C-alpha cells in the first residue's frame, strides 16, 4: 500500500497505463489510509469513498478499452469544504451549513472530473475560511501530522494535513490572505496561490471576493503544477476569471533568475530558527547561480491593517445571506422576521465569523467609510506600486511564509490580534492579486519551514520552475 504514496502524478499515470496496478487499488489504499489516520488528525469533514471508487472504475474501464486517460487519472484528491462537489455536503465548517448539500460542481471540481481525478473527501477549514489555524472550525481543530499537539495552519489546514499524512495525494484549498500557503508551510507541503482570476471561483463559498483564490497543495512542486494546469483557465460563470492558457516552463535555469530579498520580511519578530533556514536556502540558490538582490517593499507594514479592514468589509457583505431564511439553519422560536435573523446568527455562527461581520459593518458604516475602507484601498494601490517597482529589478521575491513555526493548539485562540500576525507575509500578495508559492525547505526539529516565492501576475510557470529547481538543491 505504501508504494502509491511515494509516486509522482506522472509516475502513477505511466504505471496505470503499463497496468502495474489499477486505479481501484490506488483508491482503496488511500481510503484505508484515511480510516487509519484521520481519527487522530481531523483533516476530513466528509469522506467520499464511494465516489472515489466510482471514478476509479471509470479510469480502469478506459485503460482496458485502450482509451486516453486524463492527466490526473487515478489521483486521489481532497477538496476544501468551502468548494462545491455535487450532491456532497458542503459546510464551510459552520453549523449554519451543517446539512447543506451542494447542488452542482464548482468549476474546478468539474475540471478535475474531466481530468479523471478521484475525489476522496471534503477537508476541514476555519469557519467560512476565517482563520490561520483551523481552530475556528465548528467541527474541531485539524492537528499537524508532524506534531499533533500543534495546529496544521489555516484556513486550508485540512487539505494540507490530508496531503502531508498521505490521506490524499493532492488537494485543493482556497487562499484569501495566506490560507493555502500558511498550512502548506506548517505541514511541510507545497501550496500555490495563483494570480487572481487565473482559476475560477465559481462554486467557492465566498469570504472576501476580491481576495479569494482556489489553488493546489501537493508534496512536490511538479504535482502542484499539474493540478494547477488542470484547474486554471477562463470560466464563463466567473466574471473575474482571465482568458489564460497555462503553459509549463520545463527549463528554468537558476543562473538566469534574479531573486529579490525584501528587507521588510526579515524584520523584528521573526523566529531566528525560521530566518536561519530561509537564509540557508537563499545561499544555496546563490551558489546555484541565482542573482540575489536586496529590495524594499516599504508599505508592507501597512498591509496587515489594510487587509483586515478590506477582508472584514467584504465578509460583512458576503455573509449577509446566511440569515436562517435565504441560506442556512434557522433558529426555532423566533416570533418575527428580525428575531429569526438574529437568533439564527447567534446560534449557528462562530465567534470569529461574528467578530469579522461586526468589524466590517463598522468599517463600512456612515462616518467611518472614508477613514477606514477608502484608506485601506489606497494602501492597496501603494502596495501594488511597491511590487511593480521591485519586479522591474527582479523576477521573483522570496522570504519566509510565516514568522514562526507551527504553534500549539489553543496557544493563540484568546488573542485574535496575535493570530492575525500569522498572515504578516502572505496578505500583501492577495491585496495585489499576485501568484505565490510555499515550498518546504527543511525542518527545525520535527517542524517544517516554508519558503515564500512571489511572482509577477501570471508568472506561475516561472514560480513552479524555480520551485522545482530549488527542490533539487535541498
Image (cartoon, rainbow, N blue to C red):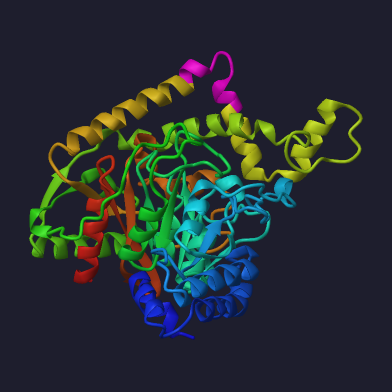
The answer to whether 359 is drawn above or below residue 221 in the figure is above
**Residue drawn 51% across the image and 47% down it:** 107
Image position, residue 184 (x, y; %): 41, 60
Q: Classify residue 120 as left or right of residue 200.
A: right
Quadrant (top left, top right, bottom left, bottom right) of the C terminus: bottom left
Task: From the viewer's side, name the closer residue of 169 and 118.
Answer: 118
Is 369 a magenta residue?
A: yes
Rendering coords of residue 122 (x, y %): 59, 60
How far across and how far down the image is residue 290, in percent?
11, 57
Q: Is 318 drawn above or below residue 364 in the view shown?
A: below
Is residue 430 found left or right of 160 in the rendered image?
A: left
Query: Residue lying farthest top?
Result: 367
- Residue furthest to the front in view is 65
Give the side of residue 446 with respect to residue 253, left or right: right
- Name the quadrant containing residue 220: bottom left
Residue 173 belongs to magenta span: no
The residue lying at 66 percent from left, 44 percent from top is: 351
Residue 347 seen in the figure? yes
- For the point 49% across and 76% down, the residue is 23
Is residue 155 shown to the viewer in this render?
A: no
Where, by quadrant of the figure, is residue 256 drawn?
A: bottom left
Q: Quadrant of residue 148?
A: bottom right
Tell me: 207 left or right of 386.
Answer: right
Magenta range = 361-371
Amino acid at each position: 500500500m505504501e508504494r502509491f504514496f511515494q509516486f509522482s502524478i506522472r509516475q502513477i499515470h505511466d504505471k496505470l497505463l503499463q497496468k502495474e496496478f489499477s486505479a481501484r487499488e490506488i483508491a482503496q489504499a488511500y481510503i484505508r489510509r484515511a480510516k487509519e489516520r484521520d481519527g487522530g488528525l481531523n483533516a476530513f469533514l466528509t469522506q467520499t469513498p464511494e465516489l472515489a471508487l466510482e471514478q476509479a472504475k471509470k479510469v480502469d474501464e478506459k485503460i482496458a478499452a485502450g482509451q486516453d486517460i486524463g492527466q490526473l487519472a487515478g489521483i486521489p484528491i481532497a477538496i476544501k469544504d468551502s468548494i462545491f462537489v455535487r450532491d456532497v455536503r458542503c459546510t464551510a465548517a459552520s453549523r449554519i451549513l451543517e446539512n447543506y448539500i451542494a447542488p452542482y460542481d464548482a468549476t474546478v471540481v468539474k475540471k478535475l472530473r474531466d481530468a479523471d481525478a478521484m475525489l476522496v473527501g471534503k477537508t476541514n477549514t476555519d469557519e467560512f475560511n476565517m482563520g490561520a489555524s483551523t481552530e475556528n472550525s465548528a467541527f474541531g481543530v485539524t492537528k499537524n501530522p508532524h506534531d499533533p499537539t500543534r495546529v496544521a495552519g489555516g484556513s486550508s489546514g485540512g487539505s494540507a494535513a490530508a496531503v502531508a499524512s498521505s490521506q490524499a495525494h493532492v488537494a485543493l484549498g482556497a487562499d484569501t490572505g495566506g490560507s493555502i500557503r500558511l498550512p502548506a508551510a506548517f505541514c511541510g507541503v507545497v501550496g500555490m496561490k495563483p494570480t487572481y482570476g487565473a482559476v475560477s471561483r465559481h462554486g467557492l463559498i465566498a469570504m472576501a471576493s476580491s481576495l479569494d483564490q482556489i489553488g493546489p497543495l501537493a508534496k512536490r512542486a511538479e504535482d502542484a503544477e499539474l493540478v494547477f494546469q488542470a484547474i486554471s483557465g477562463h470560466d464563463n460563470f466567473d466574471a473575474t476569471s482571465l482568458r489564460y492558457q497555462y503553459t509549463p516552463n520545463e527549463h528554468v535555469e537558476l543562473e538566469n533568475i534574479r531573486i529579490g530579498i525584501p528587507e521588510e520580511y526579515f524584520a523584528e519578530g521573526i523566529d531566528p530558527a525560521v530566518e536561519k533556514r530561509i537564509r540557508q536556502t537563499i545561499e544555496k540558490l546563490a551558489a546555484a547561480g541565482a542573482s540575489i538582490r536586496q529590495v524594499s517593499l516599504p508599505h508592507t507594514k501597512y498591509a496587515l491593517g489594510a487587509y483586515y479592514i478590506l477582508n472584514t468589509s467584504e465578509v460583512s457583505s458576503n455573509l449577509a445571506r446566511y440569515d436562517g431564511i435565504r441560506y442556512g439553519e434557522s433558529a426555532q422560536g423566533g416570533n418575527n422576521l428580525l428575531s429569526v435573523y438574529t437568533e439564527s446568527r447567534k446560534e449557528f455562527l462562530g465567534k470569529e465569523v461574528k467578530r469579522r461581520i461586526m468589524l466590517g459593518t463598522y468599517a463600512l458604516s456612515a462616518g467611518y467609510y472614508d477613514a477606514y475602507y477608502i484608506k485601506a484601498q489606497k494602501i492597496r494601490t501603494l502596495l501594488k506600486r511597491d511590487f511593480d517597482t521591485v519586479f522591474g529589478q527582479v523576477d521573483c521575491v522570496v522570504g519566509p511564509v510565516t514568522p514562526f513555526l507551527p504553534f500549539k493548539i489553543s496557544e493563540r485562540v484568546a488573542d485574535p490580534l496575535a493570530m492575525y500576525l500569522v498572515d504578516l507575509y502572505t496578505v500583501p500578495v492577495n491585496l495585489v492579486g499576485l501568484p505565490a508559492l510555499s515550498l518546504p525547505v527543511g525542518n527545525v526539529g520535527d517542524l517544517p519551514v516554508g519558503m515564500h516565492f512571489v511572482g509577477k501576475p501570471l508568472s506561475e510557470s516561472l514560480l513552479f520552475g524555480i520551485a522545482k529547481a530549488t527542490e533539487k538543491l535541498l
